[in-house]
C-alpha cells in the first residue's frame, strides 16, 4: 500500500482546512462535503485526470463536474492548488460580492469550472451531456492512429443529486447510451440536510444504477482507503461499454467534532472545532489558508504533466490535420466557436404566395436545409420526433453501434421522455465545445426542464429548444397540454431568448439568431397548425426581434402580436377598416428579448408615441404591458377541441381583436401626450 | 381457468371498440393504450375495485389513476359502463369543445376521474400522494374493529411515465414509505412515440422498482391472461409492507392491423382497420359506440355492489361516531371541506413594535400556532426542514412505524430532495379529501416542480408551497439559488396564488387565504432575512391581496411593493421627503391574484388615478406594468455575497428607490389625464 505517502495526506488535509477556513471567513457555506470528499478528489485529480490549468479550454481535457455544487470549496481548493487563475486571495473572498468564488460554482465566472452547479441533480446530468458530446466528437473525428478525443468525464454527486428526478432520467439515458467514458462517484455519507438519509432515502442506489445498465463499484472506506479508491476508478476505466458508478462511503465533515452529522453539512465549523481539526491534521491552529509548499509542488507537478500532455496532443492534431484535412479544419473551426462561412445562405426564404405551413414543419425545413452546412448541430427530441419535426431525413441516430440502430457519430438524439435530463444534458453538450444541441418537446413540457433552462441562461449555454404545440392552437389535447404561462416564465428569465415566429421567414430568423448567439439559449415556440406566409415578413426584419409588418401612417392603433396570431391581426386590419372605419398597423414581435436590444429610436419607430397599442397573444398577458397599452390574451386555461373552435371560443378572431382595438382607441383618445409604452422614465437593471 | 367467460371478453372488446370509435369521431386521440390495457382494466375494476358511481366522492372508495392519461378513452369507457354521470353522448363528444370528455382526463370536469393526468409521470406520482393520504388517514382514524379507511390506490403507467424523473422520485418515496395499499401496473408494451423503446429506454424497470423497495410481479401475456392478471393483483394485495408494481407485457393497439407499433399510439385507426377490428371482436362494423346489454348488466352489477359497500361503510362510520365521538366528528367535518370553527383566531398577530423576524420564521410561527386547530394540515419539506422552518416542535414524522422514526398518523413529511414528486404527491394528497398538504423548498426550486404546480392550478387542488429563500436576499448561495423569474412564472399561471408577505401579519393573512381557498394552490414566498413588523399592516388589510400601507392625500407618487422591499419603501418615503421634498404613499401587494379579485373601486383607491406608481420588487419586472407606471426590479441574475451588500449592489436601498421615484414623477408630470394602470379599456378573459 505504499502508493500514498505523507504529502498525499498533507494535500488532502490542506483541501479540508482550506474549506474550513473559507467557510468560516464567509460565515456561510458547506464544509462537510469538501472534508469528506478530499481523499477521492486528491486521488482522482492526481492519478487519473489530465488537464492543463494554463489552458482550461483544451478540448481533450478530462472533465470534472461537482454535482453537489454546494461543496464548491473542494473544487476551488483544487483549482487553486493546481495553478488555475484562482489565487489564495480569491479563496479568501469565498461567497463575497463580485468574487470569482461564488457560493456555488459558476462556469462563466471561474477558470477550471466546467459547468454551473448547485441546483441538485443538474451537474450529474451535465456530466452525461459532456460524455455524450465526447463520444459523439470521438465518433466523428477519431481515426485509426488518431485517438484524438478520448477524455473522460468524472462527476461527484451526493444523496441530494441521487434523489433528484433529473439525475435519474440522465442516469437511465447514460446507461442506455453505454457511455463508457463517464465515471460518477457517489458520496454515500448517509447525510442530507434533514439529517440521516434513513428518514427519506432508503433505496438501494447501486442496484438502481445496475438496473440502468451501469457498472458499479463500492469503496467502503472512502475516508482512508486511497488505494481502494484508486483501484475502483481504475476498474471503471477498464469498463468501456458502460458508464460506471462508484459508491464511496465517506464521513461527512471528516475530522470535525460533528463529523458524520448534518451539523457539518451547511454550516461553518465553530472556532474550537476548527482548532482541533487543524491540530488533528498537523496544521497550525493559529494560521488560516495555509498551503504547505510540498503540496503546491505535488499539484503543480501534475499540472505540468497536463501541460505536456496538451502539447503532445497539439502535435497529434497538427499531424491529423495533415492526413485528414477536412475533418481537421472542421474541428479547428468548431473550437473557435464560429459557424461555417455562408451557412446562413441555406436558410429557407418564403414569399407571401407560398403555402401555409405549421411552424413546426417550417422548423423541420430549416434543419433539413442547414444540417449539412452546420455539422456541429445535433438535434433530438424527448420522444416526440414525429410531432416536433426535429429529424432531418438523412439523420443517423446517436446510439452505441452495438444497438444496430445508430452510430457514435450520429447527430440525432433519442432523449426519451426525459425533458429535464434533456435540458441538463444539452447544457453539458454545449459546454463540451464541439456541438450545438437542439432538443424538441411540446412547449408545455419545457417547463418540466425549468431547472435546466435556468442554468442554460445563467451559464451562457447555446442550447436550442424546439418547442412545438405552442398554444391552445394544439387543439384537442386540451388544457393539460396548452401553454398559458410558459412564455411569460421564460421571458422573465434573464439571458434566455423566447422566439415565437409567425411564418417561414421568421422561423429562419429565429434559427439564425439562436445559432449565432453563442452565450444565450433559445426557446423556439412553434405551432401545430398551419400558418400563412406573411407580406412584410423577411429574415432581415425578424432578426430585429420585432418590426412593423403592416405600416400605415394614418393608423389609429398598433396591433402587436406574435406567432400564429399575427396573421389573424392581418385579417383584423381589414375587418377594422371594413366594419369600423378604423385604420390599424401591425407589429410582429417574434422575440421581445432581441427587440429590447435594438436602439430606442428603432423601437420607438415600431411602437410609436401618439397612438395606443394592443397586444394579441393567446396566452398570459403578463409582460405585454411593456409593449402595449392594452392586452388581449388568455389569463385562464384553454379548452380541448378542434383548434379553430378553441380560437373562436376565446374570440381570437378578426372580430374579437377588432372589438378590443376599438375599445382601446376609445379609451385612450383623451390622453395627451399618449406615450409609447417603450418610452420609460429610467433604464432597467439588466 | 373458468373465471372468465364470454361476457368478460365482450366487455373488454366493448372498451376497445369504444376507444376506436371515439378517437375516430374526434379525428384525434390515442386508441393504442385503451386497446392494450382493456383486459387489465376489466379485471381490476370488476374483481378488485370497490366504488360507487352514484357517489364518486365516497371517501373509502378505491382510487384509480390513469397516469398515461392520453389513453383516457379507456377511463371514459369504464366510467360510462359503470354508470357514472358520463353518457354515451359524452363519449361521442370526446375531445370536443366544452364536453366532459376532454383530450386528457380532468378531475374537476368529469365524475369518476380522481386526478388530472396526461403530462407524463404526474399521475403515477399523484397515486403515491393518494396512497400517502390513505395511509395517514387510516393511521389517524382507524381503531380496533373499525377498519374505516382501507382503500387501495391503483395506477396504470406506461413507458413515458416510467422515463419521467418525477415518477422516479415518487417511486423512491413510495418504496421508502412502504405504501402497502399502492399497486402500480406498468404497461410494458415496448412502444413509445418514437417507436420501439429500444431506441431510448432499455433499463430493467423491474429491477429499478425492486431497488426502491417495491414488490414486483410480471404478467407476460397481458393481452389474454386474465387469470394471470387477477393472480398478480391478488398477490400484490397480500403484500402489506411494500408498494407493488406489476409489469404487464401487452400489445399496444391490440386487434388493430398496426398492433404492436407506434402507428397505433397517437392516431385514430383507419376505416378499414376499424372494420376488421370490429369483425374480429364480433361487433357489427357498421355500427359505432355499441355497448351490448350484457356488458352494461355486468358493470352495473358491480356498481351496485359498490353502492352496497358504501352503505355498509356508512353504517360503520355511524357506529364509529358513537364510540369515537371526537374523531368521528373530525372526520365528518373534514369530508365537508370546512376548516374547524375559529381556527383563524390562532393566527399570530403582530404590532409594529414587535421585533424583526425572517418571514420563513413567521411562517413557522403560523404553523406552530395553528397545527392543533387544523388537524388536516400536513407539513413537510424537500429535505430543507431547518431552512424552510416547516416543522412545528411537537410534530411527528409520517413514517412507517417499523422505521422507528415516525407513525402513520404523523403529520410531517420527509419528502427528500424530490421537489417535483413532492408537488405531484401533494396534488394526490389534496385530492384524497382528508388532508391539506404544505411542502417546503427554496422558492427557486419550486420551478423543478413546475409540471406539478401547473396541475395543482388546473385541477383546483388546495396545495401550499412554503417557498423560502425567496430572492437575492438569500445572499451568499448566489445566483444559482436566487429567484428572478419565479414569481412572474407563477403569477402568469392561472388559478395559482403567489404570496410574498412583508411581515408577520401579512404572513398570517397568506396562510388564512391559502387554507380557506379550497380550489386554488398557493405559493408563499418567504425571506431568509429578517423583516420589521410594519405600521399599517394588518391581517384584514393583507387578505385583500394589496392595500394602502402608508396613505398620504398629498402624495406625488405611489410605491407598490412586496415582501422584503416594502419596509425599504417605508424608508424611501422618509428619504424622499428629507432629500427631495417629495411626498410618497406606499402600497403593499402581497398577492396580486387576490388583489385582482377585489372591486374596481377598492383597487382604484389603492392605486389611484392622478399620480404615477412605481413598483419595487427585487426580481423580474415582468408583469408589474399592470400595477405601476414604472418598475424597479432585477432583470438580470443576482450575486453571491452577504445580502445587505447584494441589495446595495443593485440599489435596492431608500436612495436607489428614491432616485427612480423622482425620475418617475418627472417623467409623468405632463401626462393628462394620468390614469391608474388598473384603469383599463376592456376586461380580460379569466
Ligand atoms: Ca449526503
Ligand atoms: Ca409504451
Image (cartoon, coloured by chain):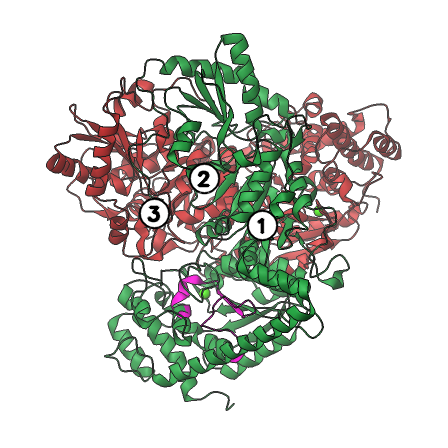
Chain colours: A red, B green
Q: CA distance from mark 1 to mark 2?
A: 35 Å
Q: Is residue B226 visible?
A: yes
Identify the secondary structure beneath mark 1: helix
In the rendered structure, the residue with mark 2 lies on which chain? B
| Disc sitting over residue A167 in the figure | 1
Residues B76 and B119: in front is B76
Q: Residue at x 75, y 60 (%)?
A: B403
Range of residues picked out in magenta: B47-75
Q: Quadrant of the C terminus of chain B?
A: top left
The answer to whether residue B61 is magenta is: yes
Residue B333 percent across, percent down from the top left: 58, 60
From the viewer's perspective, is the residue at label 1 or at label 2 nearer? Answer: 2
Q: CA distance from mark 2 to mark 3?
A: 23 Å
Residue A372 percent across, percent down from the top left: 34, 43
The residue beneath circle 3 is: A471
The residue beneath circle 2 is: B593
Which quadrant holds residue A611? top left
From the viewer's perspective, is the residue at label 1 or at label 3 nearer? Answer: 3
Amino acid at each position: 500500500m505504499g502508493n500514498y505517502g505523507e504529502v498525499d495526506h498533507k494535500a488532502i488535509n490542506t483541501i479540508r482546512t482550506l474549506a474550513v477556513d473559507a467557510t468560516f471567513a464567509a460565515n456561510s457555506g458547506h464544509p462537510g462535503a469538501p472534508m469528506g470528499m478530499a481523499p477521492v478528489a486528491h486521488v482522482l485529480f492526481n492519478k487519473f485526470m489530465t488537464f492543463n490549468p494554463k489552458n482550461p479550454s483544451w478540448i481533450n481535457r478530462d472533465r470534472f463536474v461537482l454535482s453537489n455544487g454546494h461543496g464548491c470549496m473542494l473544487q476551488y481548493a483544487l483549482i487553486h492548488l493546481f495553478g488555475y487563475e484562482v489565487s489564495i486571495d480569491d479563496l479568501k473572498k469565498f461567497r463575497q460580492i463580485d468574487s470569482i468564488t461564488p457560493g456555488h460554482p459558476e462556469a462563466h465566472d471561474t477558470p477550471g469550472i466546467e459547468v454551473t452547479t448547485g441546483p441538485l441533480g443538474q451537474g450529474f446530468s451535465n456530466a452525461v451531456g459532456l460524455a455524450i458530446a465526447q463520444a459523439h466528437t470521438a465518433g466523428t473525428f477519431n481515426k485509426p492512429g488518431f485517438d484524438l478525443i478520448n477524455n473522460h468525464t468524472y462527476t461527484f454527486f451526493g444523496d441530494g443529486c441521487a434523489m433528484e428526478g433529473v439525475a435519474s432520467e440522465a442516469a437511465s439515458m447514460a446507461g442506455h447510451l453505454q457511455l463508457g467514458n463517464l465515471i460518477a462517484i457517489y458520496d454515500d455519507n448517509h447525510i442530507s440536510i434533514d439529517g440521516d438519509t434513513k428518514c427519506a432515502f432508503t433505496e438501494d442506489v447501486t442496484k438502481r444504477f445496475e438496473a440502468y445498465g451501469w457498472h458499479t463499484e463500492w469503496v467502503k472506506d472512502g475516508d482512508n482507503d486511497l488505494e481502494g479508491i484508486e483501484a475502483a476508478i481504475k476498474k471503471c476505466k477498464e469498463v468501456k461499454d458502460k458508464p460506471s458508478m462508484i459508491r464511496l462511503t465517506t464521513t461527512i465533515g471528516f475530522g470535525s467534532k460533528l463529523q458524520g452529522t448534518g451539523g457539518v453539512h451547511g454550516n461553518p465549523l465553530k472556532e474550537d472545532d476548527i482548532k482541533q481539526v487543524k491540530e488533528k491534521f498537523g496544521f497550525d491552529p493559529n494560521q488560516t489558508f495555509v498551503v504547505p509548499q510540498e503540496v503546491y509542488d505535488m499539484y503543480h507537478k501534475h499540472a505540468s504533466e497536463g501541460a505536456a500532455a496538451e502539447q503532445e496532443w497539439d502535435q497529434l492534431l497538427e499531424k491529423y490535420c495533415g492526413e485528414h484535412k477536412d475533418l481537421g479544419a472542421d474541428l479547428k473551426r468548431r473550437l473557435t466557436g464560429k459557424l461555417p462561412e455562408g451557412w446562413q445562405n441555406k436558410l429557407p426564404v418564403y414569399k407571401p404566395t407560398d403555402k401555409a405551413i405549421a411552424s413546426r414543419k417550417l422548423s423541420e425545413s430549416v434543419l433539413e436545409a442547414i444540417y449539412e452546412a452546420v455539422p456541429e448541430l445535433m438535434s433530438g427530441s424527448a420522444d416526440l420526433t414525429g410531432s416536433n419535426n426535429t429529424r432531418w431525413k438523412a439523420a443517423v441516430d446517436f446510439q452505441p453501434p452495438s444497438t444496430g440502430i445508430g452510430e457514435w457519430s450520429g447527430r440525432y438524439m433519442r432523449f426519451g421522455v426525459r425533458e429535464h435530463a434533456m435540458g441538463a444534458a444539452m447544457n453539458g453538450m454545449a459546454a463540451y465545445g464541439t456541438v450545438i444541441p437542439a432538443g424538441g418537446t411540446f412547449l408545455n413540457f419545457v417547463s418540466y426542464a425549468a431547472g435546466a433552462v435556468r442554468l442554460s441562461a445563467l451559464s451562457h449555454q447555446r442550447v436550442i429548444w424546439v418547442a412545438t404545440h405552442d398554444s391552445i392552437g394544439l387543439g384537442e389535447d386540451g388544457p393539460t397540454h396548452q401553454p398559458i404561462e410558459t412564455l411569460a416564465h421564460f421571458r422573465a428569465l434573464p439571458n434566455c431568448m423566447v422566439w415565437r415566429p409567425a411564418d417561414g421567414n421568421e422561423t429562419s430568423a429565429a434559427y439564425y439568431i439562436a445559432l449565432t448567439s453563442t452565450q444565450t439559449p433559445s426557446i423556439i415556440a412553434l405551432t401545430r397548425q398551419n400558418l400563412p406566409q406573411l407580406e412584410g415578413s423577411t429574415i432581415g426584419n425578424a432578426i430585429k426581434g420585432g418590426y412593423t409588418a403592416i405600416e400605415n401612417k394614418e393608423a389609429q392603433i398598433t396591433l402587436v402580436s406574435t406567432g400564429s396570431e399575427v396573421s389573424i391581426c392581418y385579417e383584423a386590419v381589414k375587418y377594422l377598416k371594413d366594419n369600423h372605419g378604423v385604420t390599424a398597423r401591425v407589429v410582429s414581435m417574434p422575440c421581445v428579448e432581441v427587440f429590447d436590444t435594438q436602439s430606442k429610436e428603432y423601437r420607438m419607430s415600431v411602437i410609436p408615441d401618439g397612438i395606443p397599442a394592443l397586444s394579441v397573444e393567446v396566452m398570459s398577458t403578463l409582460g405585454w404591458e411593456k409593449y402595449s397599452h392594452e392586452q388581449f390574451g388568455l389569463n385562464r386555461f384553454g379548452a380541448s377541441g378542434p383548434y379553430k373552435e378553441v380560437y373562436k371560443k376565446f374570440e381570437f378572431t378578426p372580430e374579437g381583436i377588432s372589438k378590443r382595438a376599438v375599445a382601446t382607441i376609445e379609451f385612450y383618445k383623451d390622453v395627451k401626450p399618449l406615450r409609447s409604452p417603450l418610452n420609460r422614465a429610467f433604464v432597467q437593471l439588466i
